[in-house]
Amino acid sequence: MSRLSVVIPMYNEARHIGRTLRAAQQAARQAQLDCELIVVDNGSDDHGPRIANELGARVLIVPGVHIGALRNRGAALASGEWLVFIDADIEMPADGFKRLIEMQGSQGDVLGLDLDTPGPAPWFARAWQRRNQRPGSLPLHRVQWLPSANLLMRRSWFEQVGGFDETLRTGEDKDFSLRLRQAGAQLLLVNESVALHWGYEASWREWMSKELWRQGSHWQLLRSHGPSLRLLRFPALSIGAWGLDVLALIALLQGQARLGLTLLLISTLPALVQSLRQSQRDPHLTLQLWALHGVRLHLTGAALLLNLFQWNVRRPARG
């Protein structure tokens, strides 16, 4: 029987880790795989490590490191032919591992399931999750990068690229995907079945704080991989939006209302274009994403300034 090693980084996830581990065990049974559970904890002060241990996981305590290091420490302990990385708040479907392993090699090398939010999530968390979904007749989508919420691959691919970059506070999944693609790996997103993301943002403050933290990866990725159109595009749009906002404010203060409003409208166009691309022709979702992308554009500019002056947004590494 093939062995599957499931690596789960964690920080203060006592409310979710039990569900995550049970779902992973069930998915491994359905795939008829021997399952090894490894939880790498970043120094939690809740009962998450105890819960994980009681459910049969091997728990490793590694405080004070970034999330890439947590995943790498877990992979170093893993003995499985297959490596799976799952965030501590992800509920895998019962057929998740079975589907991914059936497709690995023949249709893709590194695979992940599409994510959805459970029913209680607020509108902005549901809309933000839906922006990444790829519904339609095609159950498989070749992609440029895969988020690290759930990833499956043979150990050889992980070792070939040297694992995750341990210096990155965030954006380690994009960096990992870039290096995998450079090594020749095919990245595949599967939406025949979806995993549930229980760690959704429950408030506007939490959503904005998390996005500000996430956007801090742009500067580090540019330094690691060098300037490219794909990496520069979003920061450039953010700087442009901030610039147009400043010009609009100056125009309004000078009594040029028409010019000021025109500039403000132009500054919202990148967010609208992005929303139209992701809203699956749903007008209601388009409006929701338009607002969210507009806020995100401005958060990116703020994150770039914070990184430029080395003011880090503090957040423990967690899955």
Image (cartoon, helix red, strand yellow):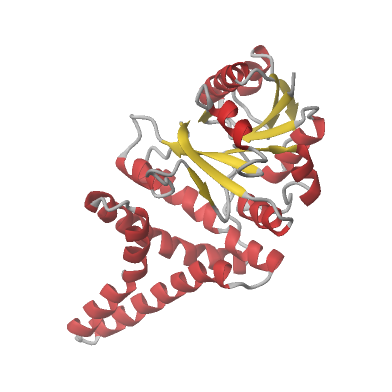
Which quadrant of the rendered structure holds the N terminus?
A: top right
Asked whether 109 or 230 is in front, the reply is: 109
Instruction: Classify residue 67 by image quadrant.
Output: top right
Quarter location, residue 269? bottom left
Residue placed most toward the observer, 230 or 258: 230
169 relative to 139 in the view: left or right: right
Q: In the rendered view, does 80 fall on the left or right side of 263? A: right
Q: As displayed, is residue 263 above or below residue 214?
A: below
Q: Which residue is at a point 32% across and 60% down the rendered structure image?
A: 276
In this view, 122 is above or below 304: above
* Spot occupied by residue 235 in the image (x, y as percentages of width and height): 51, 69
Q: Residue at x 67, y 56 (%)?
A: 181
Q: Residue placed farthest to the front in the image?
A: 106
The residue positioned farthest toward the top in the image shown: 54
Looking at the picture, how far across and down is residue 107, in whole percent?
60, 43
Figure label count: 0
Residue 13 visible to an observer of this rendering: yes
Query: Percent from the top left, x then y, of residue 298?
Result: 42, 64
Q: Residue at x 36, y 59 (%)?
A: 277
Instruction: Judge whether residue 10 can be spotted in this image.
Output: no
**Residue 34 found in image quarter:** top right
Quadrant of the image containing the C terminus: top right
Q: Where residue 22 sits in the image (x, y, percent)? A: 57, 17
Q: Who is closer to the viewer here, 220 or 61?
A: 220
295 to the left or right of 191: left
